[in-house]
Image (cartoon, grey):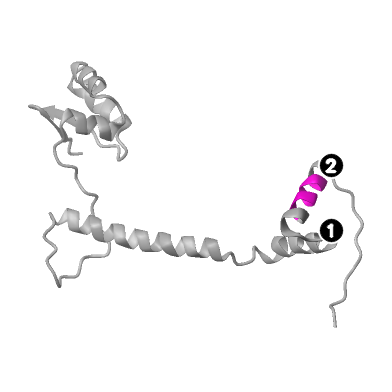
C-alpha cells in the first residue's frame, strides 16, 4: 500500500525550472519523484553518501598518520621499536636552519628575492619572511643560514 500523497501546484522561476529538469535527467526521475526527492533531502537532511563517508574516514586516518609523523620528527627520529608515540604534538615542529634556496622554496619565492629582502635590514626581513611563511614564522640570517626567530 502506497502512502497517501497530496497534490501541489506552484510556479517556478525559469532558472529553477531548468535546474529541476537537469536534476530529473541526472537522477533519471520524473517530475513528481524529483520534487519528492528534493523535498526529502531538504527536510530530512541529505541522504547518506558512501563516497563522502569514505573520504571522511580517509581524512581521519591521514590526520592520525600525520600526528605520528610529527611526533617522530619532533623527537628527532628516536622513536624506537615497541615504543608508543603520542597521538598529538603539544608544540609545532621547529624548522631547522635553512639555506637560501630552502627558505625560498618554503616562502614560495626565488632565492634572489630572499637575497634582496635580506639587504633591506634585519627587522624588515623578519616582517617580510613572516608575511610569506606558511606557519607565520619570522626568519633571520645568521652566517650563511636562516634561522627561526623565537617569539
Towards the viewer: 58 or 71: 58
Check whether the beta carbons of the residues at disc 2 and disc 1 lie within 8 A of each other. no
In this view, the residue in front, 121 or 115, is: 115
The x and y percentages for residue 55 are: 47, 60
Residue depicted at x 20% and y 29%: 101
Q: Which mark is residue 60?
A: none
The quarter of the picture where residue 38 lies is bottom right
Q: Which residue is mark 2?
A: 14
Which residue is the site of mark 1?
31
Viewer-side residue, 102 vs 67: 102
Q: Can the viewer see residue 89 in this picture?
A: no
Residue mark closest to the camera, 2 vs 1: 1
Q: Taking 52 as reference, is 19 above or below it?
A: above
- Name the quarter where the N terminus is drawn: bottom right
Q: 10 Å neighbourhood of mark 2: few (<14), some, or many (≥20)? A: few
Q: Quadrant of residue 140?
A: top left
Residue at 35%, 59% in the rendered image: 63
Describe the element under mark 1 as helix, strand or loop. helix
Give the residue displayed 88% in from the left and 71% down from the top: 5
Task: Specify the segment rendered in magenta.
Answer: 16-23
Which picture quadrant has residue 150? top left
Q: Quadrant of the C terminus?
A: top left
- Dominant SS in magenta: helix
Amino acid at each position: 500500500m502506497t502512502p497517501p500523497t497530496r497534490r501541489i501546484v506552484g510556479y517556478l522561476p525559469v532558472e529553477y525550472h531548468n535546474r529541476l529538469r537537469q536534476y530529473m535527467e541526472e537522477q533519471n526521475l520524473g517530475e513528481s519523484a524529483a520534487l519528492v526527492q528534493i523535498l526529502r533531502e531538504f527536510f530530512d537532511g541529505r541522504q547518506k553518501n558512501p563516497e563522502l563517508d569514505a573520504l571522511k574516514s580517509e581524512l581521519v586516518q591521514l590526520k592520525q598518520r600525520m600526528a605520528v609523523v610529527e611526533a617522530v620528527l619532533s623527537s628527532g627520529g628516536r622513536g624506537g621499536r615497541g615504543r608508543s608515540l603520542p597521538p598529538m604534538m603539544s608544540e609545532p615542529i621547529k624548522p631547522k636552519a635553512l639555506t637560501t634556496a630552502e627558505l625560498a622554496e618554503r616562502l614560495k619565492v626565488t632565492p634572489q628575492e630572499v637575497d634582496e629582502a635580506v639587504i633591506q635590514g634585519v627587522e624588515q626581513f623578519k616582517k617580510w619572511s613572516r608575511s610569506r611563511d606558511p606557519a607565520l614564522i619570522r626568519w633571520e640570517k645568521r652566517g650563511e643560514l636562516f634561522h627561526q626567530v623565537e617569539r
